[in-house]
Image (cartoon, coloured by chain):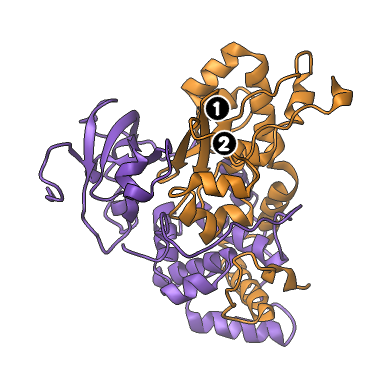
Chain colours: A orange, B purple
Amino acid sequence: MSDTHHDHGHEHGHHHREPESVLSLRVRALESLLVEKKLVASDAVDRIVSAYEEDIGPHNGAQVVARAWLDPAYKQRLLADGTAAIEELGFGGVDLKVVENRPGVHNMVVCTLCSCYPHALIGLPPVWYKSFEYRSRAVREPRVVLREFGLDLPENVEIRIWDSSAELRYLVLPERPAGTEGLSEAELAGLVSRDSMIGVAVARPPAPAAR
Amino acid sequence: MNGIHDMGGMHGFGRVDREENEPVFHAPWEGRVLGISRACSAQHLFNIDESRHGIERMAPVDYLAASYYERWLDRTVRLLVEKGVITREELDRRMAQLASGGDPAPPHRDPKLLDRMLRATKERTHFRQPGPPPRFAAGDRVFTRTDAPEGHTRLPRYARGKDGVIDAVHGTFIFPDTNAHGQGEQSHALYSVRFDANDLWGASAEPCSPVHLDLWERYLEPAGAAPGRSTS
């Protein structure tokens, strides 16, 4: 079991307080103590880890977005009460607010204080979302940050930043790309990236073959 | 608290680095920390606000030096020690035992715990609780308090003492500032508040980039009230 990847500059330049083997040992010791006290069961930890590795990810949110693109009544319900609307598709565990991109308005989500993120719909956050760089800068210079992500928005497009400071979680409803008429819900979902639901990207255009 | 975690608007951190095809966990221990932490929550050993405040109380140099899941580990151990669930000596002893091979903990299965942990990923949250009716309505102009409490709060420093507008009334929610300190849930109104970038960042603001924060009523005063006057 190697922990060496974990040092690849995610929060670059910061050294670790402990050698990683010690860190791993410390976690095993904590789990062992809590199992002995019957407060933690290792199979429950295994199952949660595999749920996040296999089941809970951006494909969930992409399905919600594709449904909203295809069904105007669903989109209306989603924007009015995100929590109830995702329950229709079997998702939950989150008090959800959906914010819609439209011509002239782009939305972008951050958590400056910690790492709040709609796990149930887009999985666990990537390291960059939790990074000091993103957390410090997204609220103050969103246009510069978006350009680093390859998204250069004109100055007349309003960028609405949602700093997740309470127990509501924010999901961006990206604009449906042009040339996607006639695509199925599954095909549309394939155009919806995790980053587009955080608001640091837009939905992908359809591949020519998909038209 | 005016902690290192309160990073919105800070200068000096540089470009946002991204990793292509990033794995969910970068090492097995990260997943274990997440699972252990979720189990502790499901066992009601600590609540979400205590857990956030547990991370905020790391020494600033340690916070900056640690990776994300190292902060989670530090928080989990800190809270379990404070609550008397484990001791640091016990943890050190167990590390030594494991290092010399073998795990003295007998296997333990708990299908009910697993069920609670899985349900927490799917069911409605419990953060909305009954509370007094909201004082403000959408469109009202407000002013954020300038208090700098030593304890947990969710009003970031960059948005203190600022003019804003109520964008939406979310309902009544458990209040983190008290719930993190064993002072009860004290649920009350939570609002989405919109701030103009110019009001937050002055001359260095980017054009057309308002920031929205979800703020509890106790962080707010009606616009026009004397700035920073505390009412509690």
Q: Position of residue B226 (x, y in %)?
A: 10, 45
User: Which residue shows up at 28% across the image and 37% down it?
Assistant: B164
Q: Residues within 10 Å of mark 1 (few under 14, many from 20)?
A: some
Residue at image mark 1: A101
Q: Position of residue B12 (x, y in %)?
A: 47, 65
| In this rendering, position of residue B3 left or right of residue A199 | left
A23 vs B15, nearest the viewer: B15
User: Which mark sits nearer the N-terminus, 2 or 1?
Assistant: 1
Q: Check the picture and name the quadrant holding the N terminus of chain B.
A: bottom left
Amino acid type, callout 2: Leu
Please say if the residues under marks 2 and 1 sit with CB atoms less than 8 Å apart. no
Q: Which residue occupies 77% across, 31% down?
A: A190
Q: Secondary structure at mark 2?
A: loop
Horizontal arrangement in the rendering, residue B170 relative to residue A14 (left or right): left
In the orientation shown, which residue stands out farthest toward the right?
A: A209
Q: Residue at x 47, y 21 (%)?
A: A80
Residue toward you, A88 or A145: A145
Query: Which label sits in the foreground, 2 or 1?
Result: 2
The amino acid type found where label 1 is placed reads: Asn
Numbered label attached to residue A153: 2
In the image, residue A154 sits, relative to residue A111, either above or below, namely above
Q: Chain of mark 1?
A: A
Q: Nearer the viewer, residue B57 or B96?
A: B57
Q: Secondary structure at mark 1?
A: loop
Q: Residue at x 57, y 63 (%)?
A: B68
What chain does badge 2 belong to? A
Quadrant of res B14? bottom right
Residue nearer the viewer, A210 or A84: A210
Left or right of residue B5: residue A29: right
Residue A77 seen in render: yes
Residue B115 horizontal/vertical position (percent): 62, 45
Residue B57 versus residue A82 in the image, above or below: below
